[in-house]
Image (tube, rainbow, N blue to C red):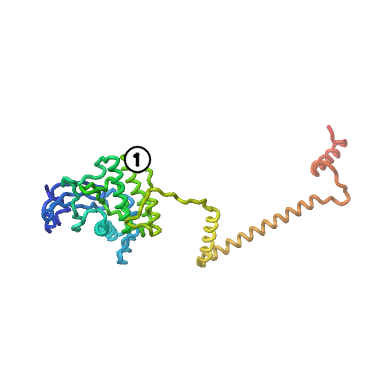
């Protein structure tokens, strides 16, 4: 097979001696079967950011930090140099996690070499020595599905005890080797203690496993290992041999919404009072207060005038007894008609 261009530097450096064939292509990388040091391995060639279809990378990379302050500023600004750093950090994350998880006893491929956007690692094989299929490609029996689920739950526990959440665990990212399932594809793995999305991603990973294996063992769909596992992790009570039941009862109580709103309003008022104002803002606020005071005085004057008018209208005219019925303008019109007609004013 013709050697793909991304693998040429490793071929020239003698890291790999031959490219046998492509294995698979995913949303973030392409994988090739290669020969290195007289054994078969796989080479994962990462796609560039413009070619990947993996979205919402920020929710996975939150909490990943670099020591160099210049690099941190460039990454935060999103400059060309910063984007290159982000891309390198995205790829290096998988290599770092593979080493850590392998040392922790998690079943992951063993990494051998990483350079020029290519990761050379162990080839996971089935019982016949062929490249292992994905979990999606097999159809386990009821008992096999239960056993697989239990094994994978233990793998997730080991990862979480190491402080890591896979973030994209599903039937497509698990290889079925001759000795059991192997977890692959870790660039999106996140730090459980530093990433605010870790709990949600963990629950989604375990739900994916339950929904897929639940096709063959329906009772798995009712399990709630995600919330149970995360609750133990938050309390510092999760260990590699922790017993899990798959049941989780959330203790809930009615929220005091009014009290929460009062606290928010009080905090906002306190922050506003403590915030220093510029001279322009202070003058503007003074004018606003003066306008409000003047408007209040004008309302008081208008109310006073109205009260005086009502009092004068109610006071009787001196020398004339108050007359019953009809309004004053109507009586005046009647008197004018009588004077003009000389009569009573009736037609």
Check the image and report above or below for 221 versus 271: above
Q: Is residue 141 visible?
A: yes
Residue at horizontal 35%, vertical 46%?
A: 207
From the top left corner, tell me how far across and down residue 340 is, in percent. 84, 38
Callout 1 environment at 10 Å: few (<14), some (14 to 19), or many (20+)? some
Would residue 235 be found to the left or right of residue 155 on screen? Answer: right
From the top left corner, tell me how far across and down residue 220 is, in percent. 35, 43
Residue found at the far top of this picture: 347
From the top left corner, tell me how far across and down residue 56 is, in percent. 33, 51
Tell me the residue that label 1 is attached to: 218
Residue at horizontal 81%, vertical 44%?
A: 328
Q: Is residue 190 visible?
A: no
Q: Nearer the viewer, residue 227 or 282?
A: 227
Q: Nearer the viewer, residue 340 or 317?
A: 317
Image quarter in which the C terminus is found: top right
Q: Nearer the viewer, residue 254 or 231?
A: 231
At mark 1, the secondary structure is helix
Residue 232, quarter of picture: bottom left
Would residue 218 be found to the left or right of residue 324 on screen? Answer: left
From the top left corner, tell me how far across and down residue 132 is, in percent. 20, 46
Residue at horizontal 29%, vertical 49%?
A: 151
Count of numbered labels shown in the rendering: 1
């Amino acid at each position: 097979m013709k050697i793909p261009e991304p693998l040429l530097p490793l071929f020239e450096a003698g890291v790999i001696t031959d490219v046998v064939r492509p294995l698979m292509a995913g949303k973030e990388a392409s994988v090739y079967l290669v020969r290195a040091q007289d054994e078969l391995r796989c080479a994962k060639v990462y796609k560039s950011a413009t070619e990947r279809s993996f979205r919402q990378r920020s929710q996975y990379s939150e909490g990943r930090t670099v020591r160099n302050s210049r690099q941190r500023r460039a990454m935060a600004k999103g400059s060309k140099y910063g984007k290159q750093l982000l891309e390198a950090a995205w790829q290096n994350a998988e290599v770092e996690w593979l080493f850590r998880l392998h040392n922790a006893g998690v079943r992951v491929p063993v990494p051998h070499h990483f350079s020029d956007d290519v990761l050379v690692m162990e080839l996971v094989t089935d019982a016949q020595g062929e490249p292992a299929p994905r979990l999606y490609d097999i159809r386990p029996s009821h008992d096999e599905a239960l056993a697989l689920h239990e094994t994978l739950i233990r793998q997730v526990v080991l990862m979480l005890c190491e402080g890591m959440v896979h973030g994209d665990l599903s039937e497509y990212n698990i290889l079925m080797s001759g000795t059991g399932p192997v977890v692959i594809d870790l660039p999106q793995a996140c730090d459980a203690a530093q990433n605010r999305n870790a709990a949600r991603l963990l629950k989604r990973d375990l739900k994916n496993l339950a929904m897929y294996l639940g096709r063959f063992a329906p009772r798995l769909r009712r399990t709630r290992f995600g919330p149970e596992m995360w609750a133990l992790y938050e309390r510092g009570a999760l260990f590699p041999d922790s017993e899990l039941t798959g049941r989780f009862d959330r203790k809930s109580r009615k929220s005091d919404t009014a009290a929460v709103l009062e606290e928010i309003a009080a905090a906002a008022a306190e922050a506003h009072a403590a915030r220093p104002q510029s001279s322009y803002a202070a003058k503007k606020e003074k004018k606003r207060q003066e306008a409000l005071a003047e408007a209040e005085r004008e309302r008081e004057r208008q109310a006073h005038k109205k009260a005086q008018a009502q009092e004068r209208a109610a006071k009787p005219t001196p020398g004339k007894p108050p007359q019953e019925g009809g309004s004053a303008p109507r009586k005046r019109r009647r008197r004018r008609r009588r004077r003009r007609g000389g009569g009573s004013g009736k037609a």
